[in-house]
Image (cartoon, coloured by chain):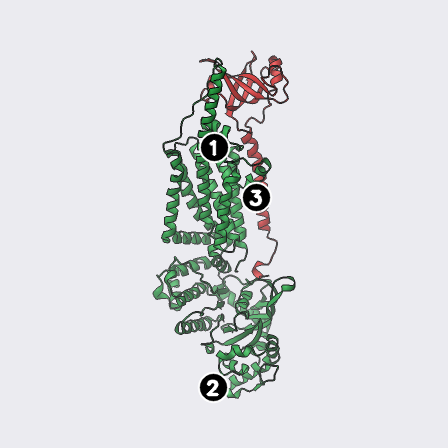
Amino acid sequence: MARRSRSKPNYLIIGAAAVLILAAIFGAKIFMGEGNDPYRKFEKLDTQTYLENSNSLRGNVYKIEGEVMNDLAWSPSQGRLFSFGINNSSSESSYSSDKHTSVIPILIPVSLNSTNIQKGQRFMVLIEVMDNGILRAKEITKASKS
Amino acid sequence: MLQLDDVTLFVGKGDNITPLLADVRLSFPQGHFVAIIGPSGCGKSTLLKVIAGVAQGEEEGTISWNGRNLSEEDFSPSEIGYVPQFSIAHDDLTAMECVQYAMSLRVVAKPGVSPQEECRLILEKVRLHEAANRLVRVLSGGQKRRLALAMELVSSPAMLLADEVTSGLDPNSEDEIVRLLAKIAHEGNRLVLSVTHSLQNIEMYDSVVVLYQGVVAYHGPAEFLTHYFQVENPQKLYSQLGNQSAKSWEQSWQKHKDAFLESIRAIQDEDPVIENTEMVTFESTEDEAPVLEESFDIESEKSEENPKTLEVEAEEVEETDPNFASIPSAYSQFSTLFGRRLRIFFRNRMQLLLQLGLIFGFPLLVAVFAWNGLPQVKNLSMNLDLDVVHQLMEAKDFLVQASKIGSLVSGIVMFQVILLTLMGANNSGREIAAERLILEKEKLAGVRAASYVASKAAFLGILVFAQSIWMGLFIHFICQLPGELMMQLLLLLLANAAMTAICLGISSFMPTAEQASLVSIYLVGFQLPLSGAVLALPQWLGDIVRPFIAAYWSWSGVLQTLKGERYYDIIQTVAQTHLSPTPLCVWVLFLHVLVGLFIAWVGCQRTRWE
């Protein structure tokens, strides 16, 4: 072999490759988690429990992901009330519109008026269970199709 | 002093092993001008490459330079100059610029000395000063060889290897070049080894090495060549070589070389100007090459010199000789290479026009699909009191609309991404492969692979920036593509940069520019079908290939910037492929860039002279 191309362990190349691989894995793990679910630190709302006894969940904050179904009501001071279809494969609730989808109302307060909400859109919503059992959105963001 | 002991070079594997050089034993003192001659394929150029340390194949034996074993401590870049058969200058630079860049890359500027003046003197020395401002592409063959010599002389190397620098030249030019090489050897106390086919000026060399089928058949003064081989003139030497086997020539030389050289020394002592060649007598047998009876071993005497004396001499040389000046810093080499690349780019009008055409033409191709802006989206009614028939009709219309607008927006984004990846492949596919031999030559002279890749990255970065930003802005404003503009520009820039970097890596590993270009274009061709933007891939296939498809990440990321718009929802209804979050897209594209540059760096570090 040519003197100048004799194989010798090139620790710089090996080290750089290792750093690159580790960075790729670490970065992907971070960005995948954050990007896919900005509310990943919050518990998912159990729609069956909520529909059966909303009082037991009062004051708690949950996340839901669902599709906008209908505009139920609107008040200039309170905000907009929408029905959301929530996919819940484990739900056997009698309130479900079908076997896998629960329909729940969510109040989008005036502070979130800038969000254009239309029928058929999918959103991830951070919700708080109010004293009267109403689910009020704290934050809302569009969801990607999984 | 250069000494080769039993140097052998094999190529091939298994039963196909072929020795290109066999048991070569040679030694050369400083200030010596040597011709290496022999028929085609006898291993002349290979011998130079073995000495330079760049020959491909398995080597045996030892090569020593000033007493040090080169396999333990190789030549420093400034110790060796190598003038290969191919041109080592860029066609779009002038002769003076080539020498100046060679000097900037190899030699640390000395205080109080004008590099410009030094370059001018070097060009004068090689008698190229009158053509100093001419482009390399218009220089004659002889002028190009003089230029190659000038570029080697900038570092004032202690040894110069010249590979067929006189081939294809007219007799006058050849004569001039040989005289020049002799002058370089004698005035600079350099060892100059010159491979040549021509025997026209053989008497100008201090000694001649005759190689035949990889073995040394003769190494001695030129004036005794005809006597040793019993030929009337040097021109008949090659036909005489064919009369015996290589083994026979080698054995004969090994057997008689001491006596032969001793006799030469005796003759030279008697009369330094040898005129009466009849004094030399030959003894030959049927199976042996003719040899001289008397001998004086110049080489043995030199090789038997006190090693201590040699070491002291070497140290003195290191202290006083500017050859051993350190090479410029990595940053200095980077800025020189970057400046040179920019100059070549702006001097090549065709390349410049092509780039302008791509930058301004490609966005037009995208814009024609939405020259009057994007259509507006009609939303579904959200009232509960709508009858079922009305709802169904509305849903049907919405689906048709979603299909049209969603496909349009997704298509526009993907089209601009694909065109940018195409520009990326065009940017760098040929970048390294097209000048690979020049790179190898410059690496031998001390240019760092990292500086070289960094200079390419900086130059290509300018192209990538101009192409991507113009594309992004043009589409944003002409087609009224909504969304976060800065993030869109970043994602488009990264897609282009990723493809540019990956193709630069490909270019560093490919043997020819054509192959590198072809592979790069194939890579672009795979971007669209494997991105899943048009047709959804099977889940398993998508999961496997998606990490490597830059177009997917850019497309997905740009679409995510439309999240606040209705277009996003519509695209979601028509797109069959999952859209990844923007930060992940940015990260993956950034990794593509890093991986591409890393591959390019590794590829440039490899030796590829063939």
Q: Are marks 3 and 1 in contact (CB under 8 Å)?
A: no
Q: Which of marks 2 and 1 is in front?
A: 1
Q: How far apart are marks 2 and 3 (CA)?
A: 71 Å
Q: What residue type is labelled 3?
A: Leu
From this viewpoint, which residue is outermost toward the top? A132
Image vertical order of residue B236 relative to residue B96, above or below: below
Coordinates of residue B336 in the picture (x, y in percent): 43, 54
- The label shown at residue B142 is none
Image vertical order of residue B326 relative to residue B3, above or below: above
Q: Which amino acid does label 1 sit on?
A: Leu
Answer yes or no: is residue B346 visible: no
**Residue holding disc 1:** B559
Q: Distance between the residues labelled 3 and 1?
A: 27 Å
**Residue holding disc 3:** A20
Q: In this view, does A3 lie to the left or right of B325?
A: right
Answer yes or no: is residue B128 visible: yes
Within-10-Å neighbours for mark 1: few <14, some 14–19, many 20+: many
**Chain of residue at mark 3:** A
Looking at the image, tell me whether mark 2 or mark 1 is earlier in sequence order: 2
> What shade has chain A been given?
red
| Marks 2 and 1 share the same chain | yes
Coordinates of residue B444 in the picture (x, y in percent): 51, 60
Within-10-Å neighbours for mark 3: few <14, some 14–19, many 20+: some
Q: Distance between the residues labelled 2 and 1?
A: 88 Å
**Residue holding disc 2:** B275
> What shade has chain B been given?
green
Q: Which amino acid does label 2 sit on?
A: Glu
